[in-house]
Amino acid sequence: MVDLFAVTTRGLETVSAAEMAALPGVIVGTTGYRRVTARVAAPDPALLTLRTIDDLFADVATWEAIGPERAALATMGTYSARIDLRPAAAVCGAVRGRPIRREPAFSVTASFVGRRNYTSDEIKLACARAIEDRHRGWTYTPDDRKADLNVRVFLEHATAHVGVRVGREPLQNRPYKQEHVPGSLRPPVAAAMVWLAGILPGERVLDPCCGAGTLLVEAAYRGGRVLGGDPDRTALVAACGNAATAQARVDLHRWDARALPVADETVTRIVTNPPWGRKVAIEADAEAFYSEIGREVTRVAAPGARIVVLTWVPEWVRSWGLWVVSELEISLYGRTPYGMVLAR
């Protein structure tokens, strides 16, 4: 058995757990702050297809009583010297379909919750020196792009979870996401919205405020027939470029989301992140703007349609008159928007 843990966006832990559990052979364990644990019988390349998580790691250690004092650096160094990372490297090689070389270069990533009297860079160095001593021939590099393996130290209060990244790069990195516009979603968040929408192959999917097209590409990955638009030409150029890189078939239009050229009751899934006047300016009263988008969403949604909206103003979306199935508060860009699942 192989123990794993995923790191995800705060608030999306249950969504990521559900996506992981849907993979054959994956047994999900616990969920915590930005973290989901799981176990698999054997390494499987399908693990690299997970889209709602930021990254996936082979679980190698849990350290307790890691305090905020600088003495904790020596403690973490001591613990690092006791870890044998070779089994985790073998797991990574099996998932990637190619063995890791015997004397790999490795990087260390560290993050923590709460105040500390040391920095993440100091954690990296303390752990890296000890790992080099324990694994003769292994070489530390501060540049993750040059590393064969990445060791992650994830400190939550007094507990440190330590893992080795399963993939060559973080799963949140999407090769298609080459173009960005203000307010553009991170791909794992977009994928989580698509997951919540329950998109099935062949379903007609709409994003009336598509921006750089992240939601559309993620919906196309799930097999949806996607339709989207935006009033901003720059955003549409970005969306077109990202869709082309992803080789996703996307029907794009320049339109006003308050007057969609879409027939009544013809869309079964809607996923969208409407602007609300902060990262993307709205040349109108923001609340009225939302109300008019809601009117159009309700008009084009087929009976039984599912709508997923990411918003910083949930009360405006609740006024659309649709059934609120669920709400998730997540952490994004230093704020706490809501992912709202609605149904008609």
Image (cartoon, helix red, strand yellow):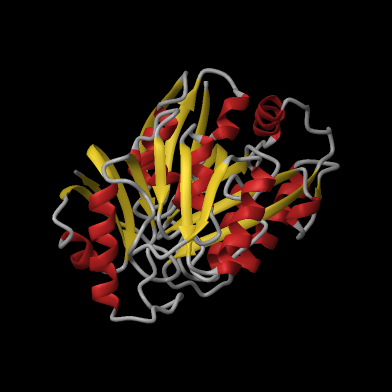
Q: Position of residue 242 (x, y in %)?
A: 63, 52
Residue 63 seen in the figure: no
Question: Which residue shows up at 29% across the image and 77% down it?
Answer: 286
Residue in the image at 16% along x and 51% along y: 322
The answer to whether residue 12 shows anywhere in this view is yes
Vertical arrangement, residue 24 with respect to residue 307, above or below = above
Q: Position of residue 327 (x, y in %)?
A: 23, 52
Quarter of the image with the C terminus is: top left
Q: How many marks?
A: 0
Residue 340: give x, y in percent of width and height: 27, 53
Q: Quadrant of residue 295?
A: bottom left
Which residue shows up at 66% across the image and 39% down it?
167
Instruction: Name the residue nearer the viewer: 344 or 336.
Output: 344
Residue 278 sits above or below residue 201 on the image: below
Question: Percent x, y for residue 108?
Answer: 67, 54
Q: Is residue 204 left or right of residue 116?
A: left
Please give left or right for residue 293 compared with residue 183 in the image. left
For the point 22% across and 61% down, the residue is: 317
- From the viewer's side, name the closer residue of 32 and 298: 298
Q: Nearer the viewer, residue 70 or 237?
A: 237
Q: Is residue 265 above or below residue 296?
A: above
Residue 287 lies in quadrant: bottom left
